[in-house]
Image (cartoon, helix red, strand yellow):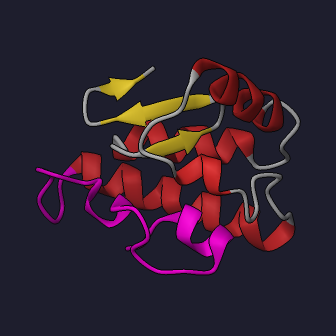
Amino acid sequence: MFCPHDVILGRQQAHGCVDTLHGPREGDMTADAADDAWHALSASLEDSAPLCNGLELFTADRLPDEDRDWCASICGRCPVALACDAYASTAKVTAGFWAGHFYTSKGKT
């Protein structure tokens, strides 16, 4: 599994999203739900380019409030925001800006 931010930015393992499913074992309902959400997001990305495409801010480890506000405004108009949010929430991502929210190892802010 890889991060849709990496798909968006055309790179692999750019900021560690590969490790977002700590804990769930194969066959665990949490892992299954995350896989389902990932597939839904991937399908959405095939149909529509996300508005964050190519924007480095969405993969930053830290963002000042004004950058978070700007990223949130981009997400608010994005055609894949619902699928992005579903994946981020289900997979418990630990890095990046997803569907209007900034995620860290401490959770969603």
Specify the segment rendered in magenta.
1-28
Picture coordinates of residue 102, whole percent (x, y): 51, 31
Residue 104 versus residue 61 in the image, above or below: above
| Residue drawn at (69%, 21%) of the image | 66
- Side (left or right) of 46 relative to 34: right
Picture coordinates of residue 10, whole percent (x, y): 63, 80
* Residue 100: in magenta span: no
Picture coordinates of residue 52, whole percent (x, y): 75, 53
- Side (left or right) of 104 relative to 79: left
Q: Quadrant of residue 72?
A: top right
Picture coordinates of residue 93, whole percent (x, y): 37, 45
**Quadrant position of the C terminus in the picture:** top left
Callout count = 0
| Residue drawn at (61%, 74%) of the image | 7
| Residue drawn at (63%, 47%) of the image | 57
**Quadrant position of the N terminus in the picture:** bottom left
Q: Quadrant of residue 46?
A: bottom right
Residue reaching furthest bottom? 11
Q: Quadrant of residue 50?
A: bottom right
| Residue drawn at (65%, 71%) of the image | 9
Q: What secondary structure do most residues of the magenta stretch adopt?
A: loop
Front one among 30 and 82:
82
Residue 85 versus residue 49 in the image, above or below: above
Front one among 12 and 80:
12
* Residue 3: in magenta span: yes
